C-alpha cells in the first residue's frame, strides 16, 4: 500500500527514538517511518545516496522530524534544509513539509 505520508526521523538518542516509536504506535500512525542517527545520514537519505540509494526501500519523506541539536545538523542546514519545501516527491503533488521549533 502506498502512503502519502512518509516520515523520516533524524534523532541520535535511542531513548528519544523509542519514545517516538511508542507515540506513533499509540497515535495509530500507519505511515512508514524511517530513522537516521545523525546529520550525515540525514543528508544521504534525502539525496538518495549510500545505503539509501533504493527509493523503493527508502522513499523520499513527506515529513522530516529533525533533532536540531543532533550531531551533524549544521551540515544539514548548510546542505539546504531551508530549501526542503521546494523539493518534490515524484509520487505526489505536494512538496516536503517541515516545521522548525525554536532553538
Image (cartoon, rainbow, N blue to C red):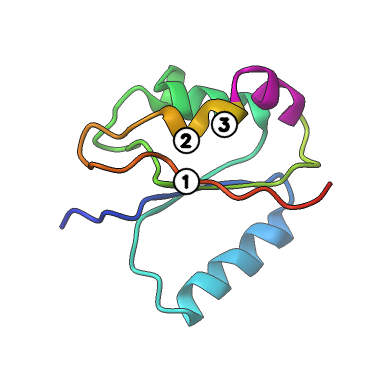
Cα separation between marks 1 and 3 = 15 Å
Q: Is residue 78 magenta?
A: yes
**Residue 43 point in image, percent of width and height:** 55, 24
Looking at the image, tell me whether mark 1 or mark 3 is earlier in sequence order. 3
- The disc placed on residue 73 is none
By secondary structure, the bulk of the magenta-drawn segment is best described as helix
Start and end of the magenta stretch?
72-80
Residue at the image position 49 percent from the left and 70 percent from the top: 24
CB within 8 Å, label 1 to label 3: no
Residue behind mark 3: 42
For numbered disc 1, what is the local secondary structure?
Answer: loop
Residue behind mark 2: 85
Q: Is residue 90 magenta?
A: no
Cα separation between marks 1 and 2 = 6 Å
Residue at the image position 46 percent from the left and 28 percent from the top: 46
**Residue 9 point in image, percent of width and height:** 55, 48
**Residue 101 point in image, percent of width and height:** 73, 52
Is residue 46 placed above or below 70 in the rendered structure? above
Q: Residue furthest right?
A: 103
**Residue 50 point in image, percent of width and height:** 45, 18
CB within 8 Å, label 1 to label 2: yes
Residue at the image position 70 percent from the left and 60 percent from the top: 16
> 41 and 7: which one is in front?
7
Q: Is 92 situated left or right of 24 in this image?
A: left
Q: Is 86 situated left or right of 42 in this image?
A: left
Q: Is 17 situated left or right of 27 in this image?
A: right
Residue behind mark 1: 97
Amino acid at each position: 500500500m502506498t502512503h502519502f505520508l512518509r516520515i523520516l526521523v533524524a534523532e541520535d538518542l535511542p531513548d528519544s527514538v523509542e519514545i517516538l516509536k511508542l507515540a506513533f504506535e499509540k497515535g495509530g500512525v500507519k505511515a512508514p517511518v524511517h530513522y537516521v542517527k545523525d546529520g550525515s545520514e540525514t543528508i544521504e537519505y534525502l539525496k538518495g545516496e549510500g545505503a539509501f540509494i533504493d527509493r523503493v526501500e527508502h522513499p523520499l519523506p513527506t515529513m522530516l522530524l529533525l533533532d536540531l541539536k543532533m550531531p551533524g545538523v549544521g551540515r544539514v542546514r548548510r546542505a539546504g534544509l531551508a530549501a526542503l519545501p521546494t523539493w518534490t516527491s515524484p509520487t505526489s503533488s505536494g512538496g516536503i513539509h517541515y516545521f522548525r521549533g525554536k532553538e
